[in-house]
Image (cartoon, helix red, strand yellow):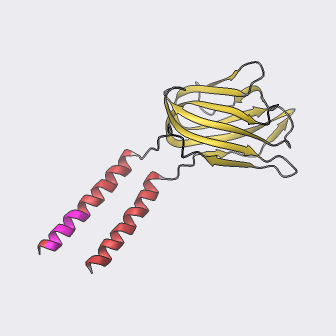
Amino acid sequence: MTKKFLFLGSVLGLMLVGLVAGPGQCLETYGEAIPTGSWSQTFKEHSVGPFDTLQVIMLEPEAAAFAAPVFQYFDMSGWQGAAVGDYPREATATGPEAETLVFTLHFAGVLHEPLSLAFRAFEGGLAGIVRESALLAWSGGATPAWTITYNYDDPHCVAVVPLPGALLLLGAGLVRLAAYGRRRAA
């Protein structure tokens, strides 16, 4: 009976960890890509922990660039985007601390040309804590689609476990330990 109870408690604990910590994948596309002379895509960044800076860097192809304005249509007031250089292959956006933000990126070129870019969300500016690091690849072609690969090997990326969830897990573990001790003493 005790082994079954310990096994069941372990499985329940692992399920709670999955529910509380949640997935580390927090950047997603939001709607379809829209051709606008150049083209644009709306994204939603959410729940990686608080962030106040976003950075995008065009990786491939070499001739690819962002179109002005690079960042636009933030769903939270106070956010502003800025391109780095005249032929922008890098851009940043800063604003008040947020845990969820919807924004639109503008790309130069044709919708059906493949490209890839790096994305990071920071807390405390570009020199602060990296809350998320991802590689975004646009397939181009007749049926283009985004592929988002999260960079868990980024040494600066910090996973966040919400405090209420961590306390819930700690409490559940302590209750289980106390119950085991009482049962063993009896």
Q: Residue at x 79, y 48 (%)?
A: 139
Q: Residue at x 41, y 60 (%)?
A: 16
Q: Is 106 positioned to the left or the right of 158 in the image? A: right
Q: Residue at x 76, y 18 (%)?
A: 86
Give x and y (percent) for residue 133. Answer: 58, 40
As rendered, which of 138 and 36 lies closer to the eye?
138
Q: Quadrant of the C terminus?
A: bottom left
Give x and y (percent) for residue 121. Answer: 56, 35
Give x and y (percent) for residue 163. Answer: 36, 45
Residue furthest to the top in view is 86
Residue furthest to the left in view is 186
Quadrant for residue 160, please give it.
Answer: top left
* Range drawn in magenta: 176-184
Q: Total label count?
A: 0
**Image: 112 above or below 51:** below
**Image: 26 above or below 122:** below
Residue furthest to the bottom in view is 1
As rendered, which of 135 and 27 lies closer to the eye?
135
State whether the magenta stretch is mostly helix, strand or loop.
Answer: helix
**Image: 21 above or below 37:** below
Q: Is 182 positioned to the left or the right of 71 in the image? A: left
**Image: 75 above or below 180:** above
Q: Residue at x 55, y 26 (%)?
A: 126
Q: Quadrant of the N terminus?
A: bottom left
Check residue 72 for magenta coloring: no
Give x and y (percent) for residue 37. Answer: 87, 32
As rendered, which of 61 and 104 lies closer to the eye?
61
